[in-house]
Image (cartoon, helix red, strand yellow):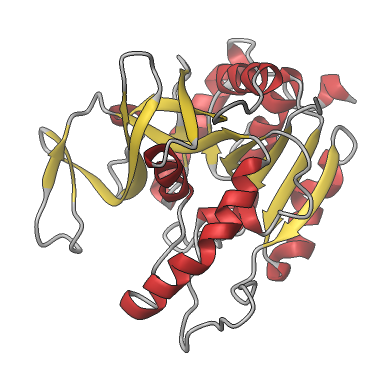
């Protein structure tokens, strides 16, 4: 069994944030959020990382992150581009939005040759999340069903007071396996609670703050890449008709389909670590304060990579 690898989705340009947040310093010595993800992943056992980026940001990304991390991990690059589509399909006129997280993973299809964890570049997940995911991927192989996993977080620990967020809302059975995950692209705090909208804010539905949500920290075998590729054309057929400018191919969508068909099961791992993210510029001070506190508590050295040299 090959050692698990880490896949980081970093192609987004941070439109809501107002800049290329993947390389915006948040640590006491100029570290970026991905630094902490990579540090935690490396000490959990991950040795290879695949960065999914756009060609347009390659030079800046390599200079800010990739070239430095290559001293500690085996670094590879995949490129998520709009025109990376199956034969016979074309990018709709005016489309600028990426095709989504499942498409991002597909862009690394020629590099993924082992069980893999996949994360967002701009989320801080905490050390425990990487350790439990690495341990799971190292000890579970596909049998009569695909063996997947995800790390779940409480919704109330993953929202921001500065705007809306997208989260995968999860349902589990008594044994801790995922039964369904529904992508909600507009979740917001309001005085006294948290709610979501599916019609650009015209109507709202409340969510329990203790709901388990996915922050896109998934663990897959290589079977996921095969399944996502096989289902992409069907997604395009529907989306190019119904929502050609904004429709997205989400990781949770593929997972839910496989669960419904009985082809996979997905265990929900629980982390006690608090999630932090920089969705908006106004989120940055809180993240910087939290990371500085973790340095003081001895969770991380400062500078971060000094003990790994």
How many marks the image carries: the answer is 0
- Residue 272, quarter of picture: top left
- Quadrant (top left/top right/bottom left/bottom right) for the C terminus: top right
Near-viewer residue (183 or 210): 183
Could you say where residue 178 lies in the image, as x and y percent from the top left?
Answer: 38, 28
- Residue 128, quarter of picture: top right
**In the rendered image of this protein, does residue 298 appear above or below residue 109?**
above
Can residue 10 be spotted in the picture? no
Could you say where residue 100 lies in the image, as x and y percent from the top left?
Answer: 49, 59
Could you say where residue 296 lies in the image, as x and y percent from the top left?
Answer: 60, 14
**In the rendered image of this protein, does residue 52 appear above or below residue 39?**
below
Seen at 35% across and 39% down, the residue is 181
Near-viewer residue (33 or 94): 94
Could you say where residue 82 lies in the image, as x and y percent from the top left?
Answer: 59, 73
Can residue 219 be spotted in the picture? yes
On the picture, is 251 further left or further right than 55?
left
On the picture, is 142 further left or further right than 168?
right
The residue lying furthest to the front in this view is: 144
On the picture, is 64 further left or further right than 194?
right
Near-viewer residue (3 or 79): 3
Seen at 60% across and 22% down, the residue is 133
On the picture, is 131 further left or further right than 240?
right
Seen at 80% across and 55% down, the residue is 62
The residue lying furthest to the bottom in this view is: 93
Seen at 57% across and 28% down, the residue is 144
- Quadrant (top left/top right/bottom left/bottom right) for the N terminus: top right
């Amino acid at each position: 069994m090959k050692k698990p690898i880490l896949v980081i989705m970093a192609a987004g340009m941070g439109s809501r944030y107002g800049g290329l947040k993947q390389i915006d310093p948040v640590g006491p010595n100029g570290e970026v959020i991905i630094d902490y993800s990579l540090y935690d992943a490396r000490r959990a056992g991950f040795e290879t990382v695949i960065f999914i980026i756009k060609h347009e940001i390659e030079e800046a990304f390599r200079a800010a992150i990739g070239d430095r991390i290559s001293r500690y991990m085996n670094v590879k690059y995949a490129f998520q581009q709009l025109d990376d589509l199956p034969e016979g399909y074309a990018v709709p006129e005016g489309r600028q939005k990426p095709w989504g997280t499942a498409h991002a993973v597909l862009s690394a299809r020629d590099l993924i040759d082992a069980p893999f964890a996949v994360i967002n570049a701009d989320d801080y997940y905490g050390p425990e999340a990487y350790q439990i995911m690495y341990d799971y991927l190292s000890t579970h192989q596909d049998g009569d069903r695909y063996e997947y996993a995800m790390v779940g977080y409480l919704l109330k620990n993953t929202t921001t007071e500065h705007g809306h967020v997208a989260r995968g809302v999860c349902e589990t059975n008594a044994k801790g396996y995922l039964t369904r995950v529904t992508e909600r692209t507009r979740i917001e705090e309001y005085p006294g609670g948290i709610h979501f909208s599916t019609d650009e804010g015209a109507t709202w539905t409340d969510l329990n703050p203790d709901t388990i949500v996915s922050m896109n920290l998934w663990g897959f075998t290589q079977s996921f890449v095969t399944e996502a590729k096989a289902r992409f054309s069907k997604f395009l057929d529907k989306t190019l008709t119904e929502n050609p400018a904004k429709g997205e191919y989400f990781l949770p969508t593929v997972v839910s389909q496989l669960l419904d068909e009985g082809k996979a099961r997905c265990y929900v791992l629980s982390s006690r670590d608090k999630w932090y993210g920089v969705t908006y510029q106004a989120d940055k001070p809180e993240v910087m304060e939290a990371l500085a506190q973790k340095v003081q508590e001895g969770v991380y050295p400062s500078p971060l990579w000094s003990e790994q040299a």
